[in-house]
Amino acid sequence: MSTKDLLARARAARAARSEASQNDPPSTPVEPTRPRQRPVDFSDDFDQLSPSPMSSLPLTLGPSTLTNMPQLKAVGERALKRFKIDAETATEYRRWLGTADRDERAALTTLYLLDVGHKLDQSIGDKVETWHPSSALKKSIRRFGWALFMLPTIQYYAGTVEHAIIAAMRSSKIRELPDADSEENAALIKAVGGELTYIRYDIKKTISKSLEAKEFEHIAKLTEQLVHHVPQVKATQGLYMRVAFIKHPDHGFWYKVDDALEALRKEGPEDFINTLRFVYDEDVEKYKGHPEDALILTGDPVTTSDPTWLQHLDKEAKKITRAVKKQGKRKRPAVEVDPEEQAEPVSGPQEEAGRNGGDEGGDENEEGGAGRDLDE
């Protein structure tokens, strides 16, 4: 059944309800359409900001040698006493002070500047290669990631999710985040993407198991298995509808889900919500489940009474745009897995649940679990 057929069925069901003058179903937050936003460009402009040392050297005119060398050496020695430098650098400095030829002096100055620039480049490169998120930061990334996927306001599941999470973490003043314009930011984006790969796989795995295990068949029980990762997120009817939509067999996973969501949004907010409700009602009828059967309460959407970090995340969820699907086989992300961090409960701003799955998820990863393509 295509999204177009599903939309037609949903419209027919709505017309039938209107003719029968039935009571309106419980209200659910309407997702406003958002303008497509351009993804944040994290391109490196460092080279453009680093002029050549040669361009700053003055053009020397006059005598080819310096005549006031004793005075220059005295000034240089006084300056040397004000700085703590190693013996080798002090020797090079005195050699420069003792150079009377102007051309040689300018050449040495240029070489010193070029050497400093080279060492700075090496230092920056080494720092980028060795930067990794701490355990506390990885827990925060997982907490934000799980919460984002449980918000019914998320626009797309395989879109610019990494940037949304990082933006919300910066607004929430999460510690240990590298500066947005630093070289380490690229490593941060990679780390967030790796954690999201595990989260997407865990969601897919839980939904697949729910279709096989009778005790998890109805949508409320299934949602309970997912939302327990982040107790701060309430199980709203909007979330039940989203889970039912992801669970629908015609949608596949992630890229296909996003394709269906994008097609529905083009039809307008009314058709968007009506179709989500239609899929949810079909799921409830098929599996005889209802939110009241769950062990969790159905609450309201994110409000000002919720934690500040969750409010920031809800704001960023509405800005997520589509991702361009890459062609060819994707490499598995190189994400380190710490067994001690798995299945850890969330309780505070710097604490969050580890990956769900325990022993069940370990062997699956070797078979292409956490590293599978988003469209599987």
Image (tube, grey):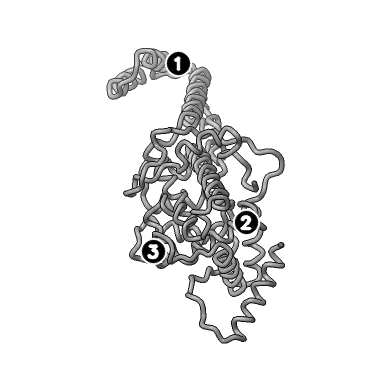
For label 2, the SS is helix
How many residues crowd around disc 3 within 10 Å: few (fewer than 14), some, or many (20 or more)?
some
> Label 2 amino acid?
Val
- Can you identify the residue that label 3 sits on? 297
The Cα atoms of the two marked residues, 1 and 3, are separated by 84 Å
Which numbered disc, 2 or 1, marks the residue that appears first in the sequence? 1
How many residues crowd around disc 2 within 10 Å: few (fewer than 14), some, or many (20 or more)?
many
Residue 201's spot in the image, x, y percent? Answer: 55, 44
Which labelled disc corresponds to residue 325?
A: none
For image coordinates 34% across by 21% down, the residue present is 76
The Cα atoms of the two marked residues, 2 and 1, are separated by 74 Å
The reply to whether the C-beta atoms of the residues labelled 2 and 3 are less than 8 Å apart is no
Residue 35 found in image quarter: bottom right
For image coordinates 36% across by 16% down, the residue present is 90
* In-front residue for pair 284/105: 284
Residue 126's spot in the image, x, y percent? Answer: 48, 27
Q: Is residue 81 visible to the viewer in this orientation of the structure? A: yes
* In-front residue for pair 185/332: 332
The Cα atoms of the two marked residues, 2 and 3, are separated by 27 Å
Q: Nearer the viewer, mark 1 or mark 3?
A: 3
Which labelled disc corresponds to residue 257?
A: 2
For label 1, the SS is loop
Which labelled disc corresponds to residue 100?
A: 1
For image coordinates 51% across by 50% down, the residue present is 163
How many residues crowd around disc 1 within 10 Å: few (fewer than 14), some, or many (20 or more)?
some
> Label 1 amino acid?
Ala
> Label 3 amino acid?
Leu
Residue 326 found in image quarter: top right
Quadrant housing the N terminus:
bottom right
Which numbered disc, 2 or 3, marks the residue that appears first in the sequence? 2
Residue 280's spot in the image, x, y percent? Answer: 56, 66
Which numbered disc, 1 or 3, marks the residue that appears first in the sequence? 1
